[in-house]
Amino acid sequence: MVCWGMTGAGAASSRQVSPPPPLNMPLRVVAQLGHGDEVFCAAFSPSGGQIASGGSDGTVVVWDATSGRQLKQFDIPSRVDALEHIFYSPDGQTILATDGEEHFFGWQTSAGKPLLFLDEEGEPATAETLIFSPDGNHLLTLDNGDNVLWNLRSAKAVKRLGDEPASSIEWATFSNQGNKLLIRDDDTAWVMDAEDGRTLYEIKDDDLDAIDAAAYSPSGRQILVTPSSGAEAWIFDSTTGKAAFRLKGHTESVNSAAYSPDGKWIATASDDKTIIVWNATNSKRIWRSKVQEAAFSSVEFSQDGKRLLTLDEDDTIATWDAGSRRLLQIKNEEESLKDVSFTASARQIVAKSGTDEETIMLYSAATGKKLYPGEDEEGQAVPSPDGRRMVVIATDDTGKNSAATVRDAESGKQLYPLKGHGLGLQMVAFGPRVSFDRKTKRMAGVMDKEETVTIVDTATSKKLLTLEHTSSVSCVLFSEDGTRIYTGCADGTVTIWNAAIGEEISHFKKQTEAVRCIADDSEGKRLVTGSEDDSVVLWDVAAQKPLLTLDDHEADVYSVDLSSDGTRIASGDATGQFIQWDAVSGKKLLQLQAHQSELVDVTYTEDGKRILTGSADKSCLILDAVSGQILTQFNGHQGPILRVGEVEGNTKLMVSIGFFPAQWDPKLGIHVT
């Protein structure tokens, strides 16, 4: 999070400032430590060469699938919720992850560039279902009628599908070419243009009742339709939208139908307890299975087209030679199943239970042996595309995800752990409750307990010390020389700690409500604190006494800073109000309505001639420190600005951090990265 050379928690100056984030905008940081605490999800890249995992710390880690070496880490600087699902796009160029509140986030896998998907209010978008186009160019998200077609490369909305039928989509699938969408709303199926979201036509026929499912043929020329009731499957011409022919041969309802990967065959499964394979061109029946013991609920082809996989209503899984005979039957005695599928290699079968707490089981497609979970084992397994390995996320007796390992898929032998999981950091980056000491590579921040600050060695992930408080900690700051740590609490207390041994040096209190922000001078002789009681206090550290109490704000003070020569104090509040004070007399030098929302960060430039501000209104400013004139305004962020500062070693560039970092030319206001 601080790799682009900013001092302390993010500001390039002789002082370290720890301002709060905007309201309801907590952040989490792991700072190249791997995952914290539990690992919740994992996915192999389409090539099988990499594994992406997501954890309760809100980060995504990419690993080399052969060696287990950590390759990359992507942080989500806008939410603290644990990541529950993770996906690669079909072309492997994008990773998407979702959190517990159904927000979804993305990254370009090669460059690591973050992709921020925003709703119409500029907040992170949510989705219950994510559907990729096969070429990886588009994404369709479904979210209780708030359905959006996205350009996956840019994270821009192509069209927000607010009108019928697109507003009531229950499921959808792209054509193999990626240019068409097949959607179903209630009992009707429609075809949509994937480039612009236009509805092209409805799939219908006078003799066709309600539609249960539909799918494109591999060539995209046909659409296979399964009715909600009826003993026939239908084939439609995808160009005209007209019915071409029907597949007649079952005596009871068809429950499932699928194309072979080459598009030559169609398999159907029925309540009449049979499977039929058809010629997809002329609708002639190729073979029909013998009547089985139970009705079939699903059927699919393996990717090589040589085998079929079926599930019946007795929860029996079976594989078949696509040329007519059954190869293997797996009788599942443990769970009620709702879905089965081949893995990409067809070496394994993935079975999902139909219980409220979904269980994922993995079987060998050759022998029927249950590969996962083993006896007395709980968790989830994700097989690699070639079927030779699997990521296992184990769950302990308490239901907590305790370990993530890579195993041989057939033998179950552990190959290596995904190391780096377990630190459990829950810190607020660029905000009040975390601070970095760059010299010693330590990080101090609030973890699981609100009253405790933990100091961590970021090079080794080792916890060094804990600082216990009697009230919730609202801000943390390392001193410039790294020898002290300042903390502010919800009860208005400020405490100074020895950063080497964790002992309290002193504490003092003046403000009556939570201390939200702290700044110190370069010598550590004075502190400035801002509080929710609307006050700014300048402290003599040695005497533990207030030198000035400044009460001109009319809202919570969100940010404070001292000029490098120590003569001025800058502050910003929850209404966007900016005030500059004389640090000796307390005289108000400047006051202006700098922003339309919370003024989240304020910092002086190194020469003291300019003041940088960042706000929840998505803008940042450069002000003349004498006149208060706005010299430059930046409006390129898509979300609240959380941090501003000069780039260390390059005073010609300014950095702002919203959901993601950006660099600007301070004279021209041009976004340069």
Image (cartoon, rainbow, N blue to C red):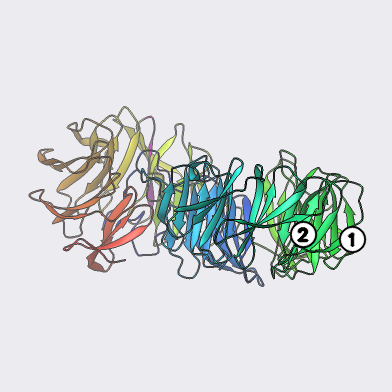
Q: Quadrant of the N terminus?
A: bottom left
Q: Quadrant of the C terminus?
A: bottom left
Which kind of residue does numbered mark 2 sit on? Ala
Query: In the image, is 80 to the left or to the right of 630?
Result: right
Q: Nearer the viewer, residue 579 or 109?
A: 109
Residue position for label 1: 328
Residue position for label 2: 267
**Residue at 25% from the left image edge and 31% from the top image edge:** 555
Numbered range of the magenta stretch: 484-491
Which kind of residue does numbered mark 1 sit on? Leu
Q: Is residue 487 magenta?
A: yes
Instruction: Give the main secondary structure, helix, strand or loop, of the magenta stretch.
Output: strand
Q: Earlier in the sequence, mark 2 or mark 1?
A: 2
Please tell me whether mark 2 or mark 1 is closer to you in this view.
Answer: 2
Q: Return the residue found at the far top.
A: 512
Disc 2: CA contacts within 10 A as few (<14), some (14-19) or many (>=20): many
Q: Nearer the viewer, residue 466 or 270?
A: 270
Height in image: 470 above or below 271?
above
**Residue at 48% from the left image edge and 58% from the top image edge:** 194
Height in image: 591 above or below 512?
below
Q: Is residue 462 visible?
A: no
Residue 245, picture quadrant: bottom right
Can you give x and y, in whole percent of width and height, for residue 629 in the image?
Answer: 10, 50
Query: In the image, is 542 to the left or to the right of 426?
Result: left
In whole angstroms, how far apart are the C-alphas of marks 2 and 1? 18 Å
